[in-house]
Amino acid sequence: MNQRNELIDILREKLASLGLTSYEITVYLTLLREGPLSAGEIAKRSGIPHSRVYDIIHRLDEKDLVEIFYGKPKKVKAVDPNIALYALVERKKRKLDRLCNHALSLINTVILAGKQAEKTTWVIETSLAEVVSHLILKARHQLLLASDHVLIDELSDELCYVSKNGVNVTVICYDNIEKLSSKDKLVQAGVELYVRKAYSLTIVLIDFLAGAISSPGISYSIMTTEPVLIRALMDLFYSSIVNTSSIVAKPPEVRGRFVSIWAIINKIEKGRKLRVNGIDLKTGKEVIVEGVVEDKIIEDGVVCLLLRTEKGIVKVGGLGAMLEDIEGLIFEVI
C-alpha cells in the first residue's frame, strides 16, 4: 500500500469518527475530487449502488456537507471542507452539551434525590423542554402546560402521545395561537387548548408527580415534587391563567381522570357519574366513593361537589379540603 492510500485510509477513519458512514465518506470524497456531479455520475465514479445514491446525498445535505443544484440533471457539489467540517463539529458539540446538561439534570433530579430524600425542589439550569419531556410520558391522569408556542411545539409529540393514551391534557399558548405550528396536531389528539394574549409564567404540571416553573426572562427553571407547591401552582394555573384565557378547542366530552377539582367543576354536568379517590376527613383513611353529581358549590374561592351515593349526599372538595367529607385526590368521570 502506497503512502497516498494510507493517508486516505486515515482520512476515512477521521471522517467516520465525525459520524459519517462508509458510503457517505466515499460519496463526499468523490465530490471533493470530481464534483459537481449528477447522481448517475456519483454512482459510476464512486462505485456506490445507484439505488443508494439519493439517500446518501440526502444525508450529506442534512449534515450541510453538500450543495444541491436543481436543474436537468440535478448536480451535487461538496461544500468547502474548511467550512463544512468545522460547522459539523460545532453542531455535534452543541448536541453533546445539551445531552450533558440533560444527563446532569436527571442525575440531580433522580439519582442524587434518592440520597437526599428531604430535597423536593431544585433549580435546574437547562432547557425546560429537556427537563420535563421524559416526565410528561409518566403522566397518568392530568397534565397542564402554559407556555409560549416554542416550548409547546417542542413538547407536542409527548403531549399528543399521553393525550391519546387517556391523559387529560390542557395547554395554554401565550401571545398568538397562529404561531403554534402543532395546533392542528394537538387538537386532533384531543388536547384542550387555550390562548392567552398576555405572557405569564411558564408552568408544567404532571399529575401530582412533579411541577416546573420558569419565565422567558430567566435562564433557569424551578422543579418540584413537593405536593404543597404543586397544589399552589395548580391553583395559580386555574385561578390566574385559565380564567384569563380564551378557549380554542376542547374535547367533545368530559372524560377520564383529573387531579384538580378546578379542572371539572365548570365542565361536569349534574347527573354525571363520578368516582373519587380521596381521604375521609373524619377518619383520615383512603376511600373511594362513587355517586351522581347532585350539585356544585363555587363560593369565595372554595369549590366542592355534592355527590349522591348509596349512603346519601357526600360533600367532596379538592386537595387541601378541610370542611368537606372527602378530600378528593383523583376525580374520574365514569
Image (spheres, grey):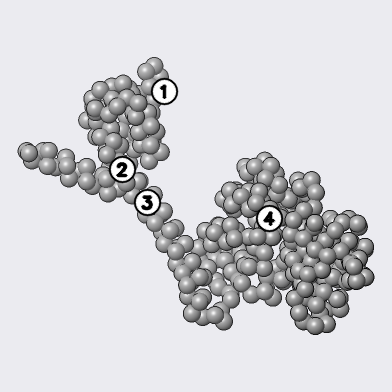
Label number found at residue 70: 1
Q: Relative to the observer, which residue lies in front, 207 or 232?
A: 207
Image point (84%, 55%), residue name: 267
Q: Which quarter of the rendering shows the C terminus?
A: bottom right
Distance (Cα) linking label 2 and label 3: 12 Å
Q: CA distance from mark 1 to mark 3?
A: 28 Å
Left or right: where 197 falls relative to 214: right
Residue 7: give x, y in percent of width and height: 14, 42
Considering the numbered disc 4 on the image, is that residue within a helix, a strand or a loop? loop
Label 2 belongs to which residue? 20
Circle 4 Cα neighbour tier, 10 Å, few/some/many (<14 / 14–19 / ≥20): many
Task: Kindly state the secondary structure of the residue where label 2 is placed.
Answer: loop
Q: Is residue 284 above or below residue 249?
A: below
* Front position among marks 3 and 4: 4
- Whole-Å distance between the Cαs marked 2 and 1? 24 Å
Instruction: Tell me which corner region of the image, top left, top right, bottom left or bottom right, holds residue 68.
Output: top left
User: Between disc 4 and disc 1, whose residue precedes?
Assistant: 1
Q: Nearer the viewer, mark 2 or mark 1?
A: 2
User: Badges 1 and 3: C-beta atoms under 8 Å apart?
Assistant: no
Residue 134 at x, y percent in the picture: 54, 59
- Label count reads 4
Write down the quadrant of residue 215 in the picture.
bottom right
In 3D space, how far apart are the residues under numbered discs 4 and 2 (Cα atoms)?
40 Å
Tag 4 residue:
167
Q: Is residue 149 above or below residue 43?
A: below
Q: Earlier in the sequence, mark 3 or mark 4?
A: 3
Q: Disc 2 or disc 3, which is closer to the eye?
A: 2
Placement of the N terminus among the 4 image quadrants: top left
* Helix, strand or loop at mark 1: loop
The tag earlier along the polypeptide, 4 or 2, is 2
- Classify mark 1: residues with Cα within 10 Å, few (<14), some (14-19) or many (20+): few
Residue extending farthest to the top is: 72
